[in-house]
Image: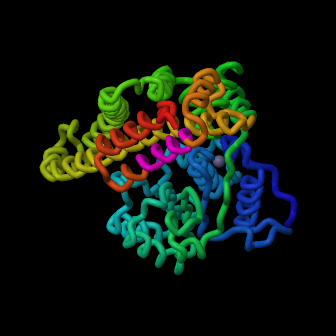
Amino acid sequence: MPDAPVPAPVFDDLVGQQLAVDELSLAVAASHGDPGVPGAAMTHAWLFTGPAGSGRSVAARAFAAALQCSLRGCGHCMHCRTVLAHTHADVRAVVPEGLTISVKEMRAVVQLAARSPATGRYQIVLIEDADRLTEGASNALLKAVEEPAPHTVFLLCAPSTHPDDVSVTIRSRCRVVGLRTPTATAIADVLTRRDGIDPQTAQWAASVCAGHVGRARRLARDGDARDQRRRILAVPGALRSLGDVFTQAAELLSQAKGEATSMSESRDAVELAELKTALGAGGTGRGAVGASRGSAGVVKEMERRQKSRATRTERDVLDRALVDLSGFYRDVLARSLGSDAPLLNPDIPAQVDSAAARMGSAGALGAVDAVLACREAIELNVKPQIALEAMLMALFAGARPPADDGS
Ligand SMILES: [Zn+2]
């Protein structure tokens, strides 16, 4: 492979992913027909994989900008700015509004993507959650990936190449770019350098974010996110009686609802105002009157999508809390096994050590399993309250020291 070109500024947001950045830069060079760069370095279907927070969608979007930009990803031109702001006319993002991406949604996007680009160099389809494609949507996409229009590029993101995440047939037609979990040092560096966060806060956030850059940024900047983490990490210590199981479940649920609602409300209001303006609701001309007659249905449709997205946001918020909780028990497990691996929660060593002494490795393992089972149950549509209660019950039972049965 020839030396990779110097990475364009648009790739700066990708933390600790040198190999991926080199590969993408080479593809951009190939797309311009640079001498000495094999044309095959560019292809029309890509799959970005990596653990949550490793920057799959950041990588895909930066690549989209670099492909559209005549300067290969300068970060400043109209193409770069609009791609990064999600408003470029030739970059279509498929984001599931509900829990899955429907076949109808996918067909519409595939059809639009077959057109010639309006202003950019390519028509780009960016699917941030390819693991949420329904089977029908997956088939619609497969057809387009198999017989691509000449200027269409597909960028898919998924946690892994496992068949549960991406169908084998789609995966076999994509070039896979694997992202890894960035190190805490790399994350702290980017928070300080690019986001202007003070080094001490950056280091703390990087050390507790489990390699998730976006999470580190939120923890460093947002007091509510820090509070939420503190509250979830207090749950194990709060299970002192059977009654606590139910009060804690209700508490967790109402917190997730509250956070999701505040996230949704501000987003919904902006969208609705934009839509109404676009439909001429604020206009006074003769055309505005006619437009507002047909627009009620469009507004209704948007409200329906917003409602479905709110459900998903609530589950995502709850899932993040459960990930934090499983991280705590993973630390407890590591400590009870005598491992000196770095903790996911290095800022609360005393809490981890006392739980390890109380629970032992078998108890900690049971707790990790209980949290995992809860995440899976919610994913499978079990009512969150039921799933949380079952988990907390298991945690309550496992957190007590083994009963002395006199033997
Ligand atoms: Zn540019």
* 331 or 89: nearer the viewer: 331
Left or right: 257 with respect to 297? right
Residue visible at 71% across and 60% down?
Answer: 28
The image shows residue 130 at horizontal and vertical percentages of 49, 61
Q: Is residue 121 above or below residue 249?
A: below
Residue visible at 18% across and 41% down?
Answer: 285
Q: Image quarter for residue 176?
A: bottom right
* 285 or 378: nearer the viewer: 378
The image shows residue 369 at horizontal and vertical percentages of 50, 47
Q: Is residue 167 visible?
A: yes
Q: Residue furthest front?
A: 407
Residue visible at 57% across and 71% down?
Answer: 171
Q: Is residue 358 above or below residue 299?
A: above
Q: Is residue 69 visible?
A: no
Residue visible at 72% across and 64% down?
Answer: 32
The image shows residue 245 at horizontal and vertical percentages of 34, 31
Left or right: 224 with respect to 154? left
